[in-house]
Amino acid sequence: MPSPATCRHAEPAERIAAQRAVIARFEAALWDGGFNENLLASYQSAWRRLEGLLESRDDALRHHFVIVIPVADSPVHLKNCLASLLDLCRAYGYGGEQDGRWRKVSLLLADDSGDAASIARNRAIADDFEQQGIATHYFGLAEQLALMDRFEGLDLTPIVGNHARDAFHHKGQAMMRNIAYLKCAELAQTLPDARLLFYTIDADQAFKVNVETPDGPREVMAVNYLAVLDAIFSENDAQILTGKVVGDPPVSPAVMAGNFLEDVIAFLREMAVVSPADAYLQPGCASTGDAAYHDMADLFGFQRRAAAYRYRCAAGAPGAPNNAACFNEFAGRLNRFFHGEHPTRVTGYEYAEVMPGMSPARTVYTGNYVFRPEALDWFIPFAPLRLRMSGPTMGRMLQAEIGARFVSANVPMLHKRTLDNTGQSEFRPGVVDESANQRVDLCGEFERQFHGDVMLFSMQRLAAQGYPGITLAAEVVDETLRVQQVEMRATYRAKQLAILDRLVQLKALLGDGAHWWNRSGSFDAELRNFQAFADNIERNFGAASSCFAHIDDPARRADWRARQLAAITGFHANRQVWAAALARLQRPRSAD
């Protein structure tokens, strides 16, 4: 016969189990045959009822999330991101409220802005969300400098960079994250919850996913991120988990121009054989699968689909838009591509149960990953190089060092690179935009992308030889970088030749006087947008491109290789310095 104590706990346990079963049934129905929006509110309500049952029984066992957001001169993105976090808390109720405050969620806002107005707005946004119930730690430039002053005698330059005190901003996402992780180590000493998770995201994301509905694409809060992640880290020994992003691609236009040109050409060929007054034939689905946006997806193990992707037109909704309206809309979105959108290859959310779908990971999406406090031992490597692909490079190293404790799960966030009213990002390093004449220069980002790809695939080769677990000779590392530079340049050359061929096709289509957009002056504005797009493609990827000239310059290539060599061979020493910095934070402040 069970003891009285056992009986007292049996009923709550049974109620919790029953409510979990209700949630499972709702979830299955929510996605059965596609997304059923009519069930979303009930699904969220079922989770809130579960929270009421868990609050008193399992409170100490649940994780406290510290959401870490680096932001640089992007207050609009930041406000939208935090609004989605607050909506997530209200919709699913993770951890419950006490005295109007969310008990298991707090925010570390790491401000890397340089503009005084942006800093003021970011502070005001932080204050606003603090008042709305999310404990917010504003980590501004002064606070960052004060923290760095605590590491006198430790050379953290290879990890956080070397920045003048009066210009301690625009350090880049990787260096800013590394500094924020030091702050996380300090916070871990002060937060009362025994179980912590650090959840690092980007300001241009939201806690939503994009789904197909009978009325077209929708952005919905259909994933209970915090409860799902709490369960994952409660039920296995994962140390680091990465999600992905849906919506806009996480990569640079530098590696998307070829396939977008293919889609633009297909769009114009389709338009050429229809009447502008006829209804536009919408594609069956607006979203694509993994890496469809990437010109070099095959390098990452993804199969390339041969056919071009069609554009999903929103003009004239509700009702069927005509071809002229869609021609206008598409022309107006073309130059958003250079700010990170891919108008024809939007990654869509595909539902799958999270726990059964977990798998070993090899890429960190730095804008969507979660880790235990002990994983603070890992900073983002090689951050001062400011290379793109820092997350995949870090992922290959994690894969080699912690193996199955580095996992991937189906918890993507919605990524929105541009603002609706401008068609541009708020802040984008490496991209020079001259809005008045629609000129965009990608050369800074392009060069960081090329050498980021060199670093990534060099790291893949070095990991196969035992790095970072063992120290490799500098000669081995240098030769690996040299060979990879040559091979990657050949890959980029092949992509450039494909772009040049497609650019010729695009210009021929635009200039053909037989096509309806050239037979009157009604589409002059649209044609100017198409021409600006073609000019920007030629400027950045054409035969006389300064971007390609930069990666072909022998002196620049030698300099990049030398800096990459120093970073890779210095990594083990940098880890020792990082460990010393963490240890200093873990001592009582009076001992510093």
Image (tube, helix red, strand yellow):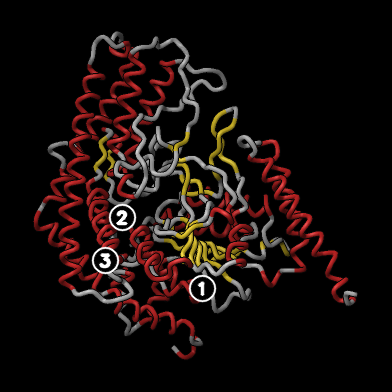
**Residue sitting at x 47%, y 56%:** 368
Position of the N terminus, as image quadrant, is: bottom right
| Mark 1, secondary structure of its residue | helix
Q: Is residue 574 above or below residue 276?
A: below
User: Quick one: SS at disc 2?
Assistant: loop
Q: Which residue is mark 1?
A: 373
Q: Residues within 10 Å of mark 2 (few under 14, many from 20)?
A: many
Give the residue drawn at x 22%, y 31%: 535
**Residue under pointer 2:** 388
Q: Earlier in the sequence, mark 1 or mark 2?
A: 1
- Residue type at mark 2? Arg
Q: Which residue is denoted by mark 3 in the rendering? A: 462
Could you tell me which quadrant the C terminus lies in?
Answer: bottom left
Residue 399 left/right relative to 354: left
Query: Toward which corner of the image does residue 385 lie, by quadrant?
Result: bottom left
User: What whole-number distance in Å separates the C-alpha atoms at marks 3 and 1?
Assistant: 28 Å
Give the distance between the C-alpha atoms of the residues marked 1 and 2, in whole angstroms. Answer: 26 Å
Amino acid type for the residue under numbered disc 3: Leu
Disc 2 from disc 3: Cα separation? 19 Å
Q: Is residue 412 left or right of residue 259?
A: right
Report x, y in % for residue 511: 22, 17
Residue at 31% x, 55% y: name it: 388
Which marked residue is nearer to the observer: mark 3 or mark 1? 3
> Which badge, 3 or 1, is on the more N-terminal residue?
1
Residue 90 appears at what percent x and percent y?
A: 67, 52
Residue 294 drawn above or below residue 177: above
